[in-house]
Image (tube, rainbow, N blue to C red):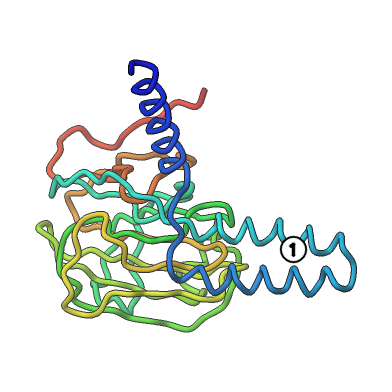
Amino acid sequence: MQGTKNTEKHSMNLVDTVRNTLVPIHRDGWKFIAMFFVASLVLGLLWEPLMWLGFLLTAWCAYFFRDPERLTPQDPDLVISPADGRVSSIAMVTPPLELELGSEPMLRISVFMNVFNCHVNRAPMRGSVRRIAYRAGRFVNAELDKASQENERNGLVIDTAHGEIGVVQIAGLVARRIVCWTSTFDSLDTGERFGLIRFGSRLDVFLPAGAEPRVAVGQTAIAGETVIAEFGSSKGPTLARRG
């Protein structure tokens, strides 16, 4: 009897491990995974090594569209990263005109996503979507500062407890498609999914006075979990040490 219980317990632990290891794939990714898989089979008819290369790319495509669960802090004073990636810039910058956030510089925190990062975007703060503004543009490297003004982008203005903030999805050198699922006047919770950008890009967050950065340039951010800024704190900007 004891042996049976131990076996059942071991089996349950194994199932839980597999369940926790397999990350869900976002529904927008399945058609691309299917396309990669079918293309792999077709290429295999021409030359078998191409099929195995195609299967490798299919696995990467599935990895790209992963959509893991995140544990998001629900403090209204905290600003949470909207994207997985590297903090590429922290600066005072005039927001894009289409956001209608005024002509005064705002704190901008940028997160750059490479082709291996999870690309599902999440709301950095709780609030109501007041404006959505799409602007066509170029596809230069999203790590460049000029990308925020020249590249194709889609901006959201969210009315929060600390005023209006801007969240801008910016297409990159490889990214050619910005997807936004939310609509004007929708309410978003902190960490709630609102869109994605296919194949490499960047997210800019514009914050009003009173926000202090809680990350450093070069730091890795996790969407829906990493605190990138804070309101109402007298601690000042966060310092970092490379080591």
Residue 169 in percent (x, y) is at 41, 68
Q: Residue furthest front?
A: 1
Residue located beneath label 1 in the image: 54
Residue 231 in percent (x, y) is at 16, 46
Label 1 sits on a secondary structure element that is helix
At horizontal 45% and vertical 49% (from top left) the residue drawn is: 23
Number of numbered discs visible in the structure rendering: 1
* Residue 160: quadrant of the picture: bottom left
At horizontal 39% and vertical 17% (from top left) the residue drawn is: 3
Q: Is residue 104 above or below residue 212?
A: below
Q: Amino acid at mark 1?
A: Gly
Camera-side residue: 3 or 224? 3
Camera-side residue: 71 or 30? 30
> Taking 199 as reference, is 121 left or right?
left
Q: Residue furthest left?
A: 161
> Taking 191 as reference, is 172 left or right?
right
At horizontal 32% and vertical 47% (from top left) the residue drawn is: 70
Q: Residues within 10 Å of mark 1 (few under 14, many from 20)?
A: many
Q: Residue furthest right?
A: 47
* Residue 235: quadrant of the picture: top left
Camera-side residue: 34 or 193? 34
At horizontal 23% and vertical 78% (from top left) the residue drawn is: 131
Q: Which quarter of the rendered picture does the N terminus lie within?
A: top left
Residue 46 in percent (x, y) is at 89, 73
Residue 190 in percent (x, y) is at 21, 55
